Amino acid sequence: MSFKLPSLPDVPGTDPSRAVLDSFKVAIAKRVADALPSLTVEQVYQGVDYGKKGVDFTIALPRFRLPGKVDVLAKTVIDQFQADDFVESVTHDKAFLHFMLKTPSLVRAVLTQVHELTYDAPSPEYGTNTSGAGKKVVIEYSSPNIAKSFHVGHLRSTIIGAFLANLYKACGWEVVSMNYLGDWGTQFGLIAVGFEKYGSEEELQKDAIKHLFDVYVNINKDAESDPGVKAAAAAWFKRMEDGDEDALKNWRVWRELSVKKYAEEYERLNVHFDVYTGESKVGKKWQDFALERLNEMGLISDAEGAKLVELDKWKLGKAVLRKKDGTSIYLTRDIGGAIERYEQHKFDKMLYVISSQQDLHTAQFIKMLHLMEFPWASSIEHVNYGLVLGMSTRKGNVVFLEQIIREAASVMHEQMKKNQEKYAAVEDPEQTSLEVGLAAIKIQDMAAKRINNYTFNWDRMTSFEGDTGPYLQYAHVRLTSLTRKNPELLPLPPPDQIAAETLAERPAAREIAFLLGTYPDVVRTALRTHEPSGVVTFAFRLAHAISSAWETVVVKGEKDVERARARMWLYLCARDVLGAAMRLLSIRPLERM
Ligand SMILES: NC(=[NH2+])NCCC[C@H](N)C(=O)O
């Protein structure tokens, strides 16, 4: 960094070159360790937490379990305290030590780092880290069923999974993102039978996903009243499993057309997959192997020809692993699929982003992988999430991803039209309303802890007021417009020639700088918890801090050019970090709206 802070001890796990607040935290830890010599800097560092409102950092002394009274210890630290370039002051409240950082160095250090890691790096890097360097993660998400509806559960998996893929990349991991399609199973026998009766080549070419769904719905109805249909479907699927080319021909076309259609929709959602695989791709070999191994372990029983695995001992019940006619099922394919993924990718970690409705299913196959003593079984994690209630379009129930995307764009479009003046200034209302609408859906989905259920609410999520996606997009657009509105201040001089110390005059500016400094920690925490909500909360805190700064930290109308430029710099750094957080959440930040 072109701006140098005094040197400090090197604490493992810190990386001041990417997270400059680490330096400030180490400085605090050093102070405390100097005053309380029975503690090392490393030990204290672990206890330096972000403070509540109005406090930068806090240490809860009791966590160190030192002999003696905590308020005496606190007083020892305070008595020895001398302000320096990092730390301005310390106070105590019973057992808590509260620290304030030195504003001018805080502001300059953070903004310089944001700037350098945004513009002096090959691609913007502020907030990223290298903790995953050399490691590989397979992340499976979305995984809809071809010819069945794409329900909101799949949408959540898609949104959360895309976030996780971005997050792991940002933390230096090699990421293999994977879509495991439900493209196999008895229902494809059913559709094949149905296609002979209801299928149309033309409809199929037009919209494969929709047409196959219609065929499925129709033939399902028939099957309810006519047991012959079910039997025919089962027989057809058996032929598919046996690799009968005639039985597979149509299915191949359906799969290909569906994948193509999905890929287009994912593109609009700003979601990407390295691999489109699916249940159909899982080979027999490992499924047979699993059955054998579990049988040797005495865990398999026979139920009228079907094979059951007994997992009661682990409170995971019983489950069918193979049907009477020898065909495989969902659970067995997951076992085989996991083994194949390890064979192919030799991952260090594998995540399954699947609804909590499948907690049992997921726990069962992971347990079986453990029982089969695959050492990598402990590198598998189920990232689960709660239900979405009440999602429908104004025309009725949502069945397809396409409907969700279209509805988001159209609801948003109407919302934007309400402000005629602004609306008139939007260049491409179609595209803009789509992006804002998608931000609305994504933010609503990721705003709370994953495991919580939430109720889908078009009105609330598309509002420009409150903590919504549109509000974030608006905050970003407003920051972007600064450069258009103040061309006379540009280009800004290099960081070390910007009068950053003038920003210290304004608490609102300091608040923004501090928040920007916390972003690398926001990313680290998200990696640990697999929770997007922390990133969403950060984005809103930042957007709120910016919105309350506009009045006191003015750019246009500030006569002193040096001050105006410093403020512009602050806002542009804020724009870059807000944009980075939005991109991490798979949202495309808008420049105009
Ligand atoms: N490996 C897995 N089981 N992934 C989840 C697949 C989800 C499944 N296709 C469904 O829609 O219910």
Image (spheres, helix red, strand yellow):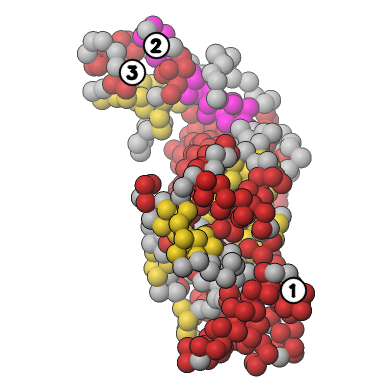
Q: In 3D space, how far apart are the residues under numbered discs 1 and 3 (Cα atoms)?
A: 68 Å
Q: From the viewer's perspective, is residue 157 above or below residue 15?
A: below
Q: Residue furthest top?
A: 37
Residue that carries the numbered disc 1 in the rendered image: 244
- The x, y position of residue 316, in whole percent, is 39, 52
**Camera sees residue 64:** yes
Q: Are marks 1 and 3 in contact (CB under 8 Å)?
A: no
* First to last magenta residue range: 14-37
Residue that carries the numbered disc 3 in the rendered image: 64
Image-based side of 249 in relation to 519, left or right: right
**Most foreground residue, 587 or 75:** 587
Task: Assign the magenta stretch its main secondary structure.
Answer: helix
Q: Are marks 2 and 3 in contact (CB under 8 Å)?
A: yes
**Camera sees residue 28:** no
Q: Quadrant of the N terminus?
A: top right
**Most foreground residue, 287 or 389:** 287
Q: Does the magenta portion include 237?
A: no
Q: Amino acid at mark 1?
A: Asp
Q: From the viewer's perspective, is residue 415 above or below residue 359?
A: below
Image-based side of 318 in relation to 415, left or right: left
- The x, y position of residue 404, in whole percent, is 55, 74
- The x, y position of residue 48, in whole percent, is 41, 25
Q: In 3D space, how far apart are the residues under numbered discs 1 and 2 (Cα atoms)?
A: 71 Å
Residue that carries the numbered disc 2 in the rendered image: 39
Check disc 2: other Cα within 10 Å, few if <14, some if 14-19, many if 20+: some
**Most foreground residue, 55 or 412:** 412
| Rendered image quadrant of residue 212 | bottom right
Q: Amino acid at mark 2?
A: Leu
